[in-house]
Image (spheres, grey):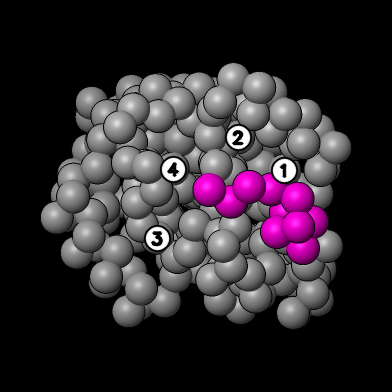
Amino acid sequence: MKHTTLIIGDIHGKLDKYENVVKFANFYGYNTLTVGDNGFQKEWEWGLKTLDTEKHRWLHGNHDSTDYVDSPLSLGHFGVWNGIFTIRGAYSIDRIHRIQGRDWFPDEELNYAQMSCCFDLWEKIKPKIVVTHDCPSSVCDQLFNFNDQPSVTRKFLEELFAVHQPKQWVFGHFHQRREKTINGTRFICLPELNWIKINH
């Protein structure tokens, strides 16, 4: 079955602007998928009460409450939704300015067991379209000219990219528009609340 999905950049609690994108998507019969950094308790509770989770789903970034990772709105730790391979998580460089359990969560990145299962699924499926919050370390180097964070996620995504190169890979986290084809994969970084349409 063919789908049209709007991939949406970081929300960061700006629910009014996000809801306008959802209304647009609903009018045309599109699904939506966010790249993460949606918000914390208030935002997730709003999403669960307001959205049709059959059509609209949220990926966890590093600025999301992991208390909701198993909720119907969440895309979980990793997996495939309507043919799109998703992986949550990123490293928070601002964690020292945040409060654990309120706006920072120690399990913001996948653990070893989760990464191992994700790696196996990646090798098995060899996805064509990928959505993550962060990006592989080599891509960070090429698109942003830095990669100095102790990010487990970024290193793990690099391992996945070395094994298989999908057709398209969309991510957020950096709040800047970037687009470049690297080793046959079209990488697109979405700014906050920007979106692209994917037919798949």
For the residue pair 183 and 46, the one nearer the viewer reads as 46
Write down the quadrant of residue 172 in the picture.
Answer: top right
First-in-chain label (3 vs 4): 3
**Magenta-drawn stretch, dominant element (helix, strand or loop):** helix
Bounds of the magenta span? 45-54
Q: CA distance from mark 3 to mark 2?
A: 17 Å
Q: Secondary structure at mark 2?
A: strand
Residue name at image x 83 percent, y 62 percent = 42
Disc number placed over residue 78 in the picture, else none: 3
Asked if residue 59 shows in the view, the reply is yes
Q: CA distance from mark 3 to mark 4?
A: 10 Å
In the rendered structure, which amino acid carries the disc numbered 1? Ile
Q: Position of residue 160 (x, y in %)?
A: 26, 52
Q: CA distance from mark 4 to mark 1?
A: 15 Å
First-in-chain label (3 vs 1): 1
The residue tagged 4 is 131
Q: Locate residue 187 relative to residue 25 in the image: left or right.
A: left
For the residue pair 46 and 148, the one nearer the viewer reads as 46
Q: CA distance from mark 4 to mark 2?
A: 10 Å
Disc number placed over residue 11 in the picture, else none: 1
In the rendered structure, which amino acid carries the disc numbered 2? Ile
Q: Report if the CB atoms under discs 1 and 2 are less than 8 Å apart.
A: yes
Q: CA distance from mark 1 to mark 2?
A: 8 Å
Write down the quadrant of residue 154 in the picture.
Answer: bottom left
Residue name at image x 63 percent, y 27 percent = 25
Q: Locate residue 154 relative to residue 120 in the image: left or right.
A: right
In the rendered structure, which amino acid carries the disc numbered 4? Val
